[in-house]
Amino acid sequence: MSSPHVIRTPDQRLRIFVSSTLQELAAERRAARTAIERLHLAPVMFELGARPHPPRELYRAYLEQSDVFVGLYWERYGWTAPGEEVSGLEDEYNLCPPELPRLLYVKSPADNREPKLATLLARIRDDDRAAYKYFETPKELAGLIENDLATLLAERFDMSRAAVTADVASDADRVVEPVRLPVPLTGLVGRDADIASIVDRLRNGTRFVTLAGPGGIGKSRLAIAAARAAAQDFEDGAVFVDLSAVHDPQRVPNRIAQALGVRDTGDAPIMDNLVTALRDRRILLVLDNFEQVLDAAPQLTGLLAAAPGLSILVTSRALLRVSAEQSYEVGPLAEDSAVNLFVERAHAVKPDFEITPENQEAVARVCAALDGAPLAIELAAARIRVLSPAELLDRLDRRLSVLVGGSRDLPERQQTIRRTIEWSTQLLAPEQRRLLARLGVFEGGFTLEAAESVGDGDGMDVLSELAVLIDSSLVSQHDSDDRPRFTMQAIVREYAREQLATDGELDSAREAHARYFIDLGARARLPLKAGGQREWMQRLGDERDNLRAAERFLLDARDWDRAAQLAFPLFLYFWVTGLLGEVRTWMDEPLESGDTLQDRTRAIALYFTRTIRFWKDPDGRVAADLSEAADLFRRCGDRSGEAMAMISLALALMAGEKPDTARAGEVMDRSLALFRETGDGWGESMALVLLGRVALLQQHLHTAFERFDESLALTQRSGDAVGGRIAAYHLGWAHLLLGSPEDARKDFALSVTLSTSLGHIEGIAYGLEGLAAVAALAGDVDRAGRLAGAAHALRERSGTHNGPTFTFHQRYLDRLAAATAPGRLAAAVAEGRELGVEQAVAEALTEPAIN
């Protein structure tokens, strides 16, 4: 029996909680409800259904399960229940979770506003978490709510894209473009002159600046600060690309593509997609940790040549030595800045620490001994909790002179930083040193659960030992949603891996790492297909680099079976986030190895390498290979895998100039039966869509409509947003072809809404194209052109322009152009190409005016 606190809306869409007094704002509440439903969202309103719970318990449960808080206020403060100090109206605001967006609307004039409400509104006005607007009529309110929610959805899209596809640290700044840069956890000390100099170069036409210096000198922090200062000069802002987890120069374009939201679909070279995405943009790329992929430098000059509005800021321990590069040497902190940094970092572990006449000289000498290197200073300052500055200086003097850590061939300042890391680890207990070493196998950060998977083989208390590493500044902690996440600086991770290799534990640690992520992928399979999609897309996005590292370890070991086992459950994640091209290169390796493969392994490899090419099959070879994959899955008893392969096989059969609809229908009938036998609701909904497409090609419109409608109902019952956006999109075309354009508009709008909530760029483009067709049919030239132009630009910028479009909107635009003044539609398309994603989504979700 479910908990009484779980109070759900039936459609599982994004929930909008509406707070207000009831009687005085009854008309406004109706207007709000209409506006919310027009955007295909779910209004959460107190009067929409009685529940057997006390009122406070009820609206607390509603709030906890809502996505946006909307507050409506006029003159009444509302009833205060016996024993309570505030009214339900104020209590709802107080109980609103801090992470919930707050859209607040105040009706005017209000000549008789009650004093308690005036006090509440004054407090709300000072709350920087809330957006605050005035209105006079219900109609005006409806327009405000609809526009604000549409914009907010676009912002949610940008946040999702940053979380899932942008290559930034998990503590990245989730703001809307034009700036997508990480937000460091601590302030930057003593670099104002450096920032000004770098920004001045970028503003004066330098397009390629390399910040050079040893690891730990502060290049990354400086680059982020300089990029943030310079971003206002770039129309498309600044994007951060962390290359610390990239060890193959050939993968650098893929990493840049992910940061920009450009999909690696595998149907065109990723550099071609990058050029298309960048050629018309004014944007600054920040490429961090380039020293380990120096051979990729010529690709950067190629991008600069192809995209005149592109500038690049690189951090590297070595110069790239290519044309157009200007170097900027990042030096140590000046003495005053070094001391200020020491004090600031010391406050983190000993809040009452201050410079005194007694310790001033010792602190200055510590900073001098550490050559003014920020990382070394941070590591030393972390020890101030147990060592006085004089004791710290004494230990550093005695230890740095003898610790070399294999760094004799490094520049002097680099040796200082490496020796300081080693000195810091010598102060740890053996269990803590061993955990630090084993944590070196992670790429891009890790969770506590993941740390325990590689560190507790001998009964180690990972949580306690990890806390010590954090206190020592060797590991940093930040939060990703409600799950703590930990990271290590690149040079610390390098040191940790060296210790693993020296101790002969590198392979065993990587094996434990791979086992954990195989298990994580298996756990993700089912929730990725249902109500856990958003959570698991976020979680897997955080682990993207670890998934790559685990896959690389398995492939290098020629462990083809487990390499396939890791990849297959994550197909949906790889597809939505545009990584199928990279997965294809992984699965090419076992196929090209010459080794005899297990049936299921070969089936998975064929599936990943052929399914992204189903639409290019002039000689039928792709269809033949997908048919083999289905047969192999059947032979090893994997009915779900067989059904999945049949979906791609049917797509291949329908993609040619002469679609084989008869065979495609037979294949999908079996696929549907298999999905139903295995209880796979996501697969069933996809199979229904494919059967609907077969019916469309056979001109059986009503059958197609029924298939799409059934698919959408399945996705709504399970909370499957990916399947929902696909089904809604196809249902829109069925409605349009059946002569119901208003129903089609609602379906396409729902597809855009669901795609936005997932950050699924390709889905947004499809929805915009469907809405463009509806507008064209209505003769709305400006709206049709803007939506079509926005979709086209989005496809170019996301790398989906070369793929199959599964859309019919162009025929509607051609008819409209023929019946319109020359150039008018083209002008509207050009205007639409200039819309940002959030603007395009807002326009798509705003109901068109009725002439």
Image (cartoon, rainbow, N blue to C red):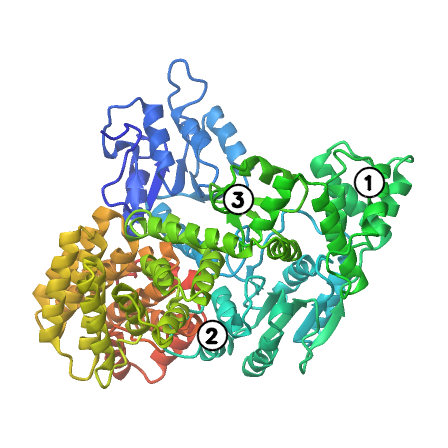
The label on residue 455 is 3
Q: Position of residue 722 (x, y in %)?
A: 29, 57
Secondary structure beneath dot 3 equals helix
Q: What whole-number distance in Å separates the C-alpha atoms at marks 2 and 3? A: 42 Å
**Residue for badge 1:** 392
Mark closest to the chain's N terminus, 2 or 1: 2
Q: Taking 595 as reference, is 395 above or below it?
A: above
Q: Amino acid at mark 2?
A: Ala
The label on residue 277 is 2
Q: Residues within 10 Å of mark 3 (few under 14, many from 20)?
A: many
Q: Residues within 10 Å of mark 1 (few under 14, many from 20)?
A: some
Which quadrant of the figure has residue 221?
bottom right
**In front here: 84 or 505?**
505
Q: Mark 2–mark 1 contact, CB under 8 Å?
A: no
Residue depicted at 28% across the width and 34% down the height? 7
Q: Taking 286 as reference, is 815 above or below it?
A: below
